[in-house]
Image (cartoon, rainbow, N blue to C red):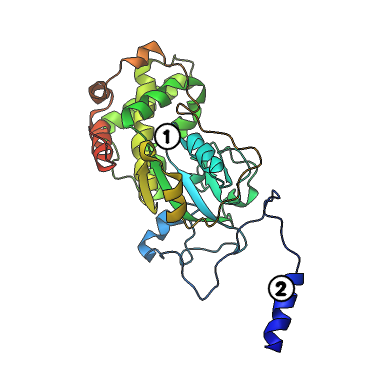
Amino acid sequence: MVVLSTVGCLLLLAPQRDPNTATHAVPRPPARTQTTTTLPPKSNCRVLNSTLKLAPRCDGYDVDYIYPLLITGTGRAGTRFAVKTLTAHGYDVAHDDARVGRIGAASWPLAIREGAYTLPNFATANAGFRGHAPRWRFRRVFHQTRDPLKTVRSRANSIGMMMAPWSYSDPLLFRDLGHCPGYPPAAELGAWQRDRRAVAGGAPWTPEVRLRVALFHYVFWNDWVRAYADWTYKVEDFDADGIARRASLGPRRPPARPKPAAAAENSRAMDPALASVTWSDLERVSPVVWRRATRLAREFGYDY
């Protein structure tokens, strides 16, 4: 009883962290004798070593910088909406170009580790995730999808943001990363490559060029992320409490100034040339890639 009383007193006297104080501190890593993440088979290390997902069997990492969660998806899949919704629920999650939050991030640039390819990466504040040998990791990766036609049209509509999808829609990139099951036939790959050279030379962004880039981005990116994600869900069914439970995020910490998430977060006026595009129209843009997109859409739970 004396020993227990002494220990109790020491714990009461120990300095306590104010839960309302903003901090960049990361969660404490699990004990080394515990296994809280399903370890991937060695055959997956080629894929995992091109990601920022915690994979103890595959490579080294900093045990003090293991963030609980990365939510990722294609551009225009609603990651900003995810950030605002989780933040409003008391979970410190950052978006693409912000310093990663205590819980983690909702970000598409953080889905691929930097390597031989020069990729647009907006996460400049997070040095531990950058470079060829990053040491920071995410314990879990959740794959967020959105209605495929809305995603493709919205991505194609973002002309000012299209240089990133050129890189992130490159089938050669995903083949070299180790997972590209929908690799296109020579004719469709050639059309994409000609578009890229033409635009680089000053040719206009025609609706067909924009749709082809966006369709490639949708297919190869979603195939890649699904290959290593812990869970795939639809943004239309977004459930902040369910995500928190599945990711074991622990107790909430209400933000100082919560920002409610809008239903049409980060929306842009749609180009009239794209507004009437249907799913069948995309088949004419790239038939084989379109069939892969249709299969993915159905597997994700969309009626296509």
On screen, residue 235 above or below 160:
below
Whole-percent x, y for residue 71 in the image: 47, 45
- Closer to the camera in the image, 251 or 23: 251
Whole-percent x, y for residue 51 in the image: 47, 51
- Looking at marks 2 and 1 on the same chain, the residue that comes earlier in the sequence is marked by 2
For the residue carrying disc 1, how many other residues have a C-alpha within 10 Å: few (<14), some (14-19), or many (20+)?
A: many
Q: Is residue 40 visible?
A: yes
On screen, residue 135 above or below 177:
below
For the residue carrying disc 2, how many other residues have a C-alpha within 10 Å: few (<14), some (14-19), or many (20+)?
A: few
- Judged from the image, the secondary structure of the residue bearing numbered disc 2 is helix
- Label 2, on which residue? 11
Q: Is residue 118 visible?
A: no
Q: Nearer the viewer, mark 2 or mark 1?
A: 2
**Disc 2 + disc 1, Cβ < 8 Å:** no
Please identify the quadrant where the N terminus is shown.
bottom right
Question: Which image quarter: residue 276?
Answer: top left
Whole-percent x, y for residue 303 in the image: 23, 34
* Residue 142 badge: none
- Closer to the camera in the image, 176 or 131: 131
- Judged from the image, the secondary structure of the residue bearing numbered disc 1 is loop
Kind of residue at disc 1: Ala
- Label 1, on which residue? 77
Kind of residue at disc 2: Leu
Q: Name the residue: 27% across, 29% down.
A: 187
On screen, residue 94 above or below 52:
above
- Closer to the camera in the image, 289 or 281: 281
Q: Name the residue: 45% across, 48% down.
A: 241
Q: Is residue 88 left or right of residue 17?
A: left
In this rendering, the count of numbered labels is 2
